[in-house]
Amino acid sequence: MEIRCFENNFHTSSMAKDLIFSVKTDLISFTMIYTLPPLPYASDALEPKMSQETIDYHYGKHLQTYIDNLNRLIAGTPFEDVPLETMILTASGPLFNNAAQVWNHTFFFNTLTPVPREMPPILKETLIRDFGSVDGFKEKFKKAALEIFGSGWAWLAADKKGRLHIIQESNAGNPIRAGYKPLMTMDVWEHAYYIDYRNRRAAFIDNCWELINWHKVADRMTEHIPVAEMTDLAGEKVVVTETVVVTTDEDDEKEDDLAETQTSQKIRNMEKYVCVICGYIYDPAEGDPEGGIAPGTPFEELPDDWTCPACGVGKEHFEKEK
């Protein structure tokens, strides 16, 4: 058995430590099986900003579901021996969704701390250089996070020249698909904050700032994370395999047109389907977690053996909602 261990604040068992192969990033992955990594803090340590109940559901149930789905999807495939980053960069459909959500959630939980410290000078100076001030960065980041329609992630990421950008991703999106190295993220799926803040996403973001481990964010500036062909805003080669919106004062008309086209395709793929037998509606935005289908999975990408959760008939008994 091969174990790939990525640098983090998590703990591994003594058996795992004997087999560790070290690479710099944030995740622990095992050949053939992924397991829920221990949190780097107690489940109640982030209270009152983030309650133990939220951690128990968000980390203990939602992340565990993505891990279970991923183990089922990679079994017996070439993906069972590759790092999560490789799956994120090359897979699509349910496999991409679950692999990315395992990566994104682990990265997010590792970004938080119950004992935040002052921001390291190197990070502070870089934020001032690229956003005018730390407060200016926070204001732009919050705006980007609030503008994400439905579920998604707001990211602080670096391009190949070390310049920082704020990136919006929907559903399971991750900026490594567009060549950016993630440094920090906030989860704006509703399950990340509904228990504590109901629909008040802005209040969740405001309180999240007080839980960010800025030293961890700064450390990531020099860590290695595999990314796709690097993109930047200086006219160099751009390879974007996922819709990414970079909030910056510099506009690139071609990137905007590409993003609009990809977004339209995503909207078409998120159409609902109705079971003609019982009336059950499959909503791609919600998926079918109990059936192993992650949120964000289009009806067209459901496995052939998927059945209606309500009456048990197959996909052939569904039609597009009118």
Image (cartoon, helix red, strand yellow):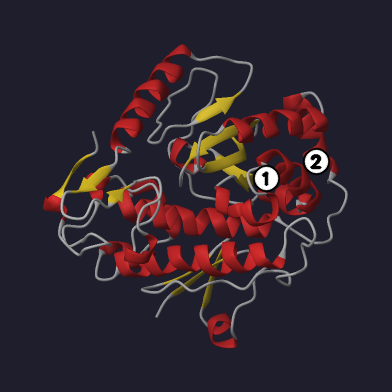
Q: Which mark is residue 290?
A: none
Residue 25 seen anywhere in this rendered image of the structure: no
Tag 2 residue: 122
Against 145, residue 93 (above or below) is below
Nearer to the camera, 284 or 22: 284
Give the amino acid type for the residue marked by disc 1 in the picture. Answer: Met
Q: On the image, which quarter does residue 202 sit in?
A: top right
Give the amino acid type for the residue marked by disc 2 in the picture. Answer: Ile
Residues at marks 2 and 1, CA–CA distance in whole angstroms = 9 Å
Against 176, residue 110 (above or below) is below
Instruction: Classify mark 2: helix, strand or loop.
Output: helix
Q: Earlier in the sequence, mark 2 or mark 1?
A: 2
Rendered residue at 22%/45% (across/down): 300
Instruction: Classify mark 1: helix, strand or loop.
Output: loop
Rendered residue at 62%/73% (across/down): 38
Residue lying farthest front? 278
Against 290, residue 162 (above or below) is above
Tag 1 residue: 221
Image coords of residue 192 (percent x, y): 60, 53
